[in-house]
Amino acid sequence: MAKTRTTTSHYEVQKLRRSDWLQFWKDNQRTIITEESVEMVDTPRRMKRGVMVSADGDVPSLNLDANLHSIEPDTVSTIHRHSWDAIMFIIEGTGWTEVQGRRYDWRPWDTVYLPGGQWHRHGGSGPTPARYVTFSVQPLVELLGLATIEDGGDTPFEDLQGGALSAAQMLGADPYSRRVSRLSDLQTAASETRILTPYEDVPFRVTPRGARSGFLVDSSLGYTTGGITAVMHQLAPGLYQSKHRHGGEAWLYCVKGEGYSVIDDERVDWKAGDLVIVDHWAWHQHFNASETDVSSIIRVHNFDTLYFAMGALLAPLNLFEEPEKLDAPPNVESIEWPDVDQGRPDA
Ligand SMILES: [Fe+2]
Ligand SMILES: [Fe+2]
């Protein structure tokens, strides 16, 4: 009979594992990834990819990842699908993305949503290479042990396998039939999600925090995502947004202009093409460094599932805090704003 001889108990093992885990993420915390630090490399998809944050580029993260992509004119990528969903934001150039065989044409500052489990490929259609940035929940899905990717190469969409489909509705009122029916409804909703937000459709409004903001991907626009959402914040010339702090992280990709963020009293300067990562529970406030032009940043997070779950699991711990009186610019209503598409490239 085997006899347990270990002297280290479950208590010590867990304690060490937890502190190693936190230390690992602390060591990998980054505040800014500049565009020029990203190396673009050829991939078998006939596109170039540059890792901003991902274990694929030795920059691991827990929840979100970010990558830059480029595709040459008259080039069509291979087709693939993966179990996580992603958001694409077009930086420059024109092209198209096919999702489940349906084509969506895009141009600079349009946003495309790539649902988990749906086959997709991309094409460049302009005279110059197209570039876009993607954000996905791949790291979180990998952490849960659910990350899968299928590569269809050049197989036509019609010849590819269907998804791991949930069973169709069942009529019974028993617990099993109820589960099957609920998951069937969820799958139907996910398959009917919106895919494209043309930039001209972004519903910009000036918020009490002082920025002019509009959702790019959100349930209010008809998206059904795994929790990932994106907003564009525009900071008025010479102005800023009210500060706040929250759990999780906020990822900010600068599309246009230049500015800086004050994160727990440290100033981080950024410009178009850079990615700023605000660590959890750090006070942060974003400033436009230009007196004449708008600066635009995209905020991406995974609040709608991961942080909602954390909020419920950690209540009554508070996961969001802002000053009782917002420190937004005075007279937000009377700010004179340039056109929303100031600086938008034609292609
Ligand atoms: Fe993909
Ligand atoms: Fe924030």
Image (tube, rainbow, N blue to C red):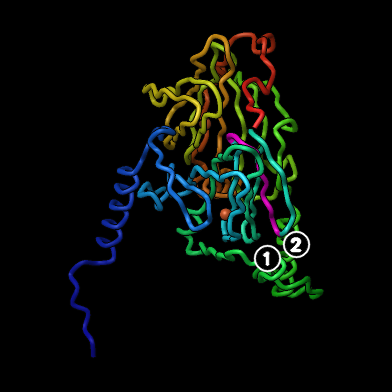
Q: Quadrant of residue 300?
A: top right
- Residue 66 bears which disc, if any? none
Q: Residue furthest bottom?
A: 1
Residue 94 x %, y %? 65, 39
Magenta stretch bounds = 91-100
Q: Quadrant of residue 133?
A: top right
Taking depth in this image into account, of 277 and 308 the one nearest to the observer is 277
- Residue 156 bears which disc, if any? 1
Lower sequence index among marks 1 and 2: 1
Taking depth in this image into account, of 84 and 293 the one nearest to the observer is 293
Tell me which amino acid carries mark 2. Asp
Question: Is-magenta flag for residue 94?
Answer: yes
Helix or strand or loop: what does disc 1 sit on?
loop
- Residue 185 bears which disc, if any? 2
Task: Tell me the residue at 60%/39% (across/down).
Answer: 89
- Along the horizontal axis of the image, is 14 left or right of 241? left
Which quadrant holds the C terminus? top right
Tell me which amino acid carries mark 1. Pro
Between label 1 and label 2, give the one nearer the viewer. 1
Residue 90 x %, y %? 61, 38
Is the Cβ of the residue at disc 1 closer than 8 Å to that at disc 2?
no
Taking depth in this image into account, of 337 and 279 the one nearest to the observer is 337
Taking depth in this image into account, of 11 and 129 the one nearest to the observer is 129
Task: Tell me the residue at 65%/39% (across/down).
Answer: 126
Helix or strand or loop: what does disc 2 sit on?
helix
**In this picture, is 338 found above or below 189?**
above
Which quadrant holds the N terminus? bottom left
Question: Is-magenta flag for residue 166?
Answer: no
Q: How many numbered tags mark residues here?
A: 2
Query: What is the distance, in whole Å, between disc 1 and disc 2 at their CAs?
Result: 28 Å
Residue 329 x %, y %? 57, 12
**In this picture, is 312 found above or below 294?**
below
